[in-house]
Amino acid sequence: MKLLLIHQNFPGQFRHLVQDLQQSAEHELLAIGRDTAPGLPGVELLRYAPRRQASTQTHPYLISSEDAVLHGQQVLRVLLELKARGYVPDVILAHPGWGETLFAKEAFPGARLVHFCEYYYHGRGADAGFDPEFPLSIDGAARIRARNAMHLLNLEQCDAGITPTHWQHGLHPAAYRDKISVVHEGVDVETLRPDPAAGLRMASGALLAAGQPIVTYVARNLEPLRGFHVFMRAARQILGRHPGCRIVVVGGDAVSYGSRPADAENWRAKMLAETGIDTTRVHFLGQIPHALYLKVLQVSAAHVYLTYPFVLSWSMLEAMASGCLLVGSDTAPVREVLRDGENGHLVDFFDVQGIAHKVLEVLHSPQRQIPLRANARETAARYGIRRGIEAYRRLLFEAAPPA
């Protein structure tokens, strides 16, 4: 199979699949990604960048659409150069979220186009407007509706789609759901495991070890969509009621979703100022190497995962595979994976006191959590890399035209 992969941040969600396909000489792989994409050894990556940004004169509702057209136009130029050299893919697997494949069929109408359908936006019932602390304006709702124009074009032209969870599948318009398969790309649950001897040395010199009352929280960046503001308020109560516990926070100070606070440099600074918590017992590690991140999960006695209804983080599944006791928000799609009292605990996203109470209950009864930790590992096994690869391969080979 001649497979063309298009992803702004290649390899992104396609890493495990590509590494598997690389093992066979049957497949010819070629990738297209932004000039900032990390790439993957052994796969030729053609980089692109839009020639300009969306105009400041563009209507605010349409800035994302113009930006998508600019991305799609530049990728089309790359595709036409490939076509001129005689290259024709059997299948194009792409994340179309930035507009890259808007015009892919103009270059290769005969290729099967498979889209990673990560998210279809809604003005209500999902992440937007979920948190009353950050109300959605009418302007914001209109902007979201206009933003979906690109996603509708993507859904209309793709031959098949993939989305990681059933909840994300249900967000897409009913007219297109039949062409979208629910396939999680998989996380490395095969190598993740508990380590009762794990230790984590802090910059202060303190050694945190598995078995101690350690609360962990992980996000790519510390921000409200992943419940950081709620977690910090709960952390203040946890620290006040459990003098021996420590809290370890992993995540950067940039913005992945939403915006920075208006009255502080970042959300960490804002929440530290609001809560006034004891920073000698809360360790902010920032964004850390993967090996250190795994140690954080292994020393955890209670791992808090909070999120608006949005894309499920790999870190939640990785925490479960590592044997963490999860205290997760009762939001979609968390509840698709986490079953209260069976493989973890579900809590109301907004209930600061309830979150703190559940974490303290876990810290005070570690033996009672052992069966839940074991069940969490069993659940995570269903989201392993091998299963994801096999499902992706079935879909791609079904999509590939007969030789």
Image: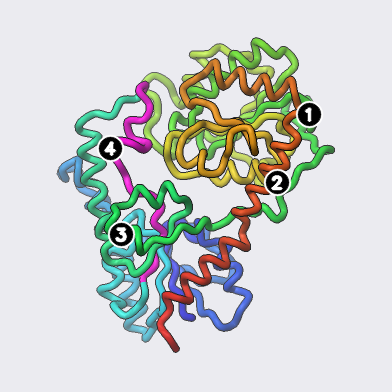
Q: Residue at position x 51%, y 79% from top?
A: 28
Instruction: Check residue 176 in the rendering and tell me which mark sits there, or answer none.
Output: 3
Q: Where is residue 19 in the image (x, y as percent from the top left)?
A: 60, 67
Mark 2 or 4, closer to the camera: 4
Mark 4 crowd level (few <14, some 14–19, many ≥20, 10 Å Cα)? some
Amino acid identity at mark 3: Tyr
Q: Which of marks 3 and 1 is nearer the N terminus?
A: 3
Mark 1 crowd level (few <14, some 14–19, many ≥20, 10 Å Cα)? few
Question: Could you tell me how far apart the alpha carbons at marks 3 and 1 are, in whole angstroms?
Answer: 47 Å
Amino acid identity at mark 1: Gln
Mark 3 crowd level (few <14, some 14–19, many ≥20, 10 Å Cα)? some
Q: What element carries label 4?
A: loop
Query: Is residue 126 left or right of 199 when viewed as pictured?
Result: left
In the image, which residues are magenta?
Answer: 113-133
Q: Residue at position x 67%, y 52% from top?
A: 189
Amino acid identity at mark 2: Ala
Q: Mark 1 points at which residue?
A: 367
Q: Residue at position x 43%, y 72% from top?
A: 4
Question: Could you tell me how far apart the alpha carbons at marks 2 and 1 are, in whole angstroms?
Answer: 27 Å
Instruction: Check residue 291 in the rendering and tell me which mark sits there, or answer none.
Output: 2
Instruction: Check residue 123 in the rendering and tell me which mark sits there, or answer none.
Output: 4
Q: Position of residue 74 (x, y in %)?
A: 30, 64
